[in-house]
Image (cartoon, rainbow, N blue to C red):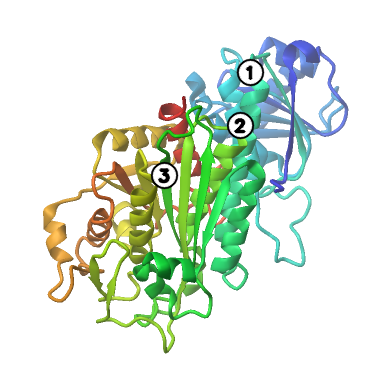
Amino acid sequence: MADGISIEIETLAASGAVLKPGGDLVLFVGEDLALSPRAAEIAGPGVADLVARAAGVERFKGKASSAMVLTAPAGLTVERLLVIGTGSDNASARDWATLGGYTAGKLGSRSATVVLEWPGTAPGTDEVAAFSLGARLRAYKFDRYKSKKSPEGEEAGGGGRLTLLVPENAGLKKALRGAEGLAEGVILARELVNEPPNVLDPEEFARRASALEKLGVEIEILDEKDMKKLGMRALLAVAQGSAKEARVVIMRWNGAEDSSEAPVAFVGKGVTFDSGGISIKGSGGMEDMKGDMAGAACVVGLMHALASRNAKVNALGAIGLVENMPDGKAQRPGDIVTSLSGQTIEIINTDAEGRLVLADVLWHVQQTYKPRFMIDLATLTGAILVALGQEFAGMFSNNDELAQRLSAAGEATGEKVWRMPLAPGFDKLIDSKFADMKNTGGRHGGSATAAQFLKRYVNDVPWIHLDIAGVGMGSPATETNRSWGSGWGVRLLDRLVRDHYEA
């Protein structure tokens, strides 16, 4: 897949002081505006004085996330000199992916040589890999359906070549391959979320997920006949109002030395378009419901990332793919359906459909594959937006250790989660007079009652539910993302696996 940017690496020890003509040169400075000795050597005599003089004129202070551009700089063979501030105490360097994204954003589609060090800071293997990850993610844009593409050099996108001059580090090539695979996984998730629903229906989504076979991922696709045989009646009830057939995709990556080791499991809600069904949504903003499959997109992107770096873990991804439409065959409020677990569900609102999809897939995964843990992701409730805005995903869990590990991964990647409560009182809100449970507990505590519903389908397996309605689509622009579909969760879960579950 194209991410719009090419990245090459040269070590500073091997680069000497010869600067290739053309393109841009990127240098980094702190608030003292000093260049590192090697950066000054590569740039050439007088460049440090040039930067200082220009900074005085431009009132450039070297603060984090600030930049100064010198066009056709005297004494240099490059077209532009881009000086990027890192702030005091290396504040911007604490998030190297953000720094890489900021740099790529300032370059646009221009090619550049980047001297990746400054006084007191020489990046190691992980920092260089994170910088390249951020640059790749910032360069992504979704313009497949535009007849007129963005102009060359537009800041929002990239298409150029970056040559990173970095200190020599052992294992750098391996780390960069891993960062590239992770970027591809995030971008794959973004592509899926951004696609229009007339293109990405459940069958097409399943076809794209099956492309992971090229990376060694085992793929099993369940069609409606298979699901009926298994008894996935809750999931099928959501799909019955659509002309598009449902699918479930099971993706297995067997990377652990012990092939019999229990897998870590990730489950995604994949409603490729959600009209609300008979309980139809208002027309305002309904077009955004093409993104109601962001959880499933994340799972596919994560499986790509794990396989591409040959992760030493057994991992399973499972996604339930449906379209929720109003039709003469659609389920109705008042219907009672029997889930795969045998538990019965009274349908109160057909727009509370994602939990029905997840219920059957979660039960199938925990019963069939006996995972070490399960994490599900779903754009499940608008209530989580009221509670947490677009800064955090809501996290509900039955296991403190797993929740703590995921929180730490969120802090490390910037894909942050906030733990929300599960409690017996929420169970009472979804008790039904006519069935084992209702599919909604009403307006109050909407995210919590949805999570409590899902908890009935995990038994004692360590489990986390992530409500990503605020972060999975239409989230605020960042230095590493200018896409409507953010690909949120791929970096988070990859970090969790990398830190705790690989041999």
Q: Amino acid at mark 1?
A: Gly
Q: CA distance from mark 3 to mark 2?
A: 21 Å
Residue 132 image point, x, y percent:
64, 32
Packing grade of label 1 (10 A; few <14, some 14-19, many >=20) is few
Location of residue 383 by image quarter: bottom left
How many marks do you count on the picture? 3
Is residue 26 found left or right of 358 in the rendered image? right
Is residue 79 found left or right of 185 in the rendered image? right
Residue 263 image point, x, y percent:
42, 39
Q: Amino acid at mark 2?
A: Gly
Packing grade of label 3 (10 A; few <14, some 14-19, many >=20) is many
Residue indicated by mark 2: 178
Residue 35 image point, x, y percent:
66, 16
Find numbered disc 2 in the image and state the secondary structure of the residue it sits on. Answer: helix
In the image, which is nearer the foreground, mark 3 or mark 2? 3
Find numbered disc 1 in the image and state the secondary structure of the residue it sits on. Answer: loop
Residue at x-position 85% and y-position 16%: 18
Decide: is 129 above or below 381: above
Residue indicated by mark 3: 265
Residue 213 image point, x, y percent:
63, 48
Residue at x-position 53% and y-position 25%: 93
Q: Amino acid at mark 3?
A: Ala
- Badge 3 vs badge 2, beta-carbon distance below 8 Å: no
Decide: is 165 above or below 356: above
